[in-house]
């Protein structure tokens, strides 16, 4: 340092100035850095960090805002597209929002509904106490749920299942009420119809029970009150015939009494068939049964100038009630009535596996195929205003077949006519 001052003194003033400037710079620069520039640099660094943090938080905030916006859009779409009516009112009950479903159901437009009170939908079906209960519930901050009727703009009454709930702010203060309502008019009407149907069913059930009691009484009368006197007449006729075997009057009484007893037995069985009751069955020889049926039509066939062909074959046994003969009687009787111009009837049977099919063929007018399905219903009207039998006869035929786990039907007879058949299990 001493040498520096010596050197400085020995030099010219210009040189001295330069050295002074250098010397001052060397001495002052560290102080300026420490006390001025370094704090400024640090402040700039902190500002950059804060700016980065602020930028990051701004991005996070924007992301949350975007996510919340998407959620609100979804919520808005859900409400707008909801299958239920949505109504929002303020705490005074003034409507501030309705969704499109509300407009569709009620007939009131958005503009017509806003600013109104839900009373515009009041139907008059519910009384004042009902609405007071609804209001008291929601003003207490609770949810009301129930069913009530409303009136549309055009005056139609409809039913809704509704939930009305308070909307609260962050301070738990009620600010609005929201009602979500589903139109249940169809379900309500269906339920009422079901109740009415149930009442009708109970009424019919009671009537059916009474009818069954009457049926049992009728069957009892037929089986006993009519059968017993007929049996007495037959017994007296038999005694009379023993004493006077050639007496025509007694013979007529006996044959008529036998026929009457058969009619009573047949009526009893037919009643059971009509009411789907089990009937007694026995092993019957099909050939013998058919011969008896055909014998009954011998005289009428002669008068009508018609022939009936039947060729018995091997013995075929069916487990059936003798009432099954009524099926063949109906078939042959109808063929005589409605196929007389064919001049002939053929009775055939065909055995396959555990079933035998008995066919009665006529050669009259062929029944249209589209009428086959209903031919065995009661009083079926066929083409050209013609009825095939009395309707009731063929309906009973079907019931008798069903009682034997058998099948009846009709098909065309080539080239002309019809084939009525019975397919029944055989032994």
Image (cartoon, rainbow, N blue to C red):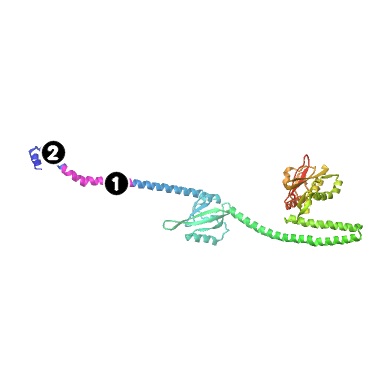
Left or right, 12 with reference to 249 = left
Residue 188: image location, x then y, percent:
59, 55
Label 1 crowd (10 A; few <14 / some 14-19 / many >=20): few
- Which image quarter: residue 120? bottom right
Question: Magenta segment, which residues?
Answer: 26-53
Q: What is the secondary structure assignment of the residue under circle 2? A: helix
Label the magenta part by its dominant secondary structure.
Answer: helix
Q: What is the secondary structure assignment of the residue under circle 1? A: helix
Residue 72: image location, x then y, percent:
45, 49
Residue 387: image location, x then y, percent:
77, 47
Residue 47, numbered circle: 1
Return the residue nearer the eye: 217 or 211. Answer: 217
Left or right, 361 with reference to 113 = right
Q: Residue at x 87, y 60 (%)?
A: 238
Left or right, 272 with reference to 20 = right
Residue 18, numbered circle: 2
Q: Which residue is drawn at 81% across and 60% down?
A: 227
Q: Is residue 382 magenta?
A: no
């Amino acid at each position: 340092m001493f040498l520096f001052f010596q050197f400085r003194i020995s030099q010219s003033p210009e040189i001295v100035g330069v050295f002074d400037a250098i010397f001052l710079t060397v001495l002052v620069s560290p102080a300026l850095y420490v006390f001025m520039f370094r704090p400024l640099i640090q402040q700039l660094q902190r500002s950059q960090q804060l700016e980065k943090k602020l930028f990051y938080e701004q991005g996070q905030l924007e992301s949350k805002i975007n996510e919340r916006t998407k959620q609100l859009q979804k919520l808005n779409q859900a409400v707008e597209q909801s299958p239920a009516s949505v109504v929002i009112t303020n705490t005074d009950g003034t409507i501030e929002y309705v969704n499109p479903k509300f407009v569709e159901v009620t007939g009131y437009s958005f503009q017509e509904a806003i600013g109104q009170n839900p009373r515009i939908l009041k139907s008059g079906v519910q009384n004042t106490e009902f609405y007071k209960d609804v209001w008291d519930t929601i003003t207490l901050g609770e949810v009301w749920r129930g069913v009530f009727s409303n009136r549309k703009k055009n005056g139609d009454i409809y039913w809704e299942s509704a939930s009305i709930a308070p909307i609260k702010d962050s301070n738990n203060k009620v600010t609005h009420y929201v009602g979500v309502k589903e139109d249940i008019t169809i379900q309500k009407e269906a339920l009422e119809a079901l109740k009415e149907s149930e009442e009708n069913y109970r009424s019919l059930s009671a009537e059916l029970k009474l009818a069954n009691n009457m049926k049992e009484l009728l069957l009892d009368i037929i089986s006993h009150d009519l059968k017993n006197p007929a049996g007495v007449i037959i017994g007296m006729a038999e005694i009379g015939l023993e004493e006077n075997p050639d007496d025509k009057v007694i013979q007529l009484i006996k044959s008529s009494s036998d026929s009457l007893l058969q009619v009573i037995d047949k009526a009893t069985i037919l009643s059971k068939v009509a009411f789907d009751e089990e009937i007694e069955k026995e092993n019957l020889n099909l050939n013998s049964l058919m011969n008896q049926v055909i014998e009954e039509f011998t005289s009428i066939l002669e008068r009508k100038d018609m022939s009936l062909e039947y060729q018995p074959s091997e013995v075929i046994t069916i487990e059936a009630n003798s009432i099954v003969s009524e099926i063949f009687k109906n078939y042959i009787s109808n063929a005589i009535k409605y196929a007389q111009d064919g001049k002939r009837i053929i009775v055939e049977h065909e055995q396959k596996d555990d079933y035998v099919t008995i066919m009665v063929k006529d050669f009259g007018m062929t029944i249209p195929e589209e009428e086959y399905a209903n031919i065995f219903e009661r009083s079926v009207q066929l083409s050209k205003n013609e009825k095939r039998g009395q309707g009731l006869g063929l309906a009973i035929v079907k019931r008798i077949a069903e009682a034997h786990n058998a099948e009846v039907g009709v098909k065309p007879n080539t080239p002309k006519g019809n084939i009525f058949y019975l397919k029944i299990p055989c032994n």
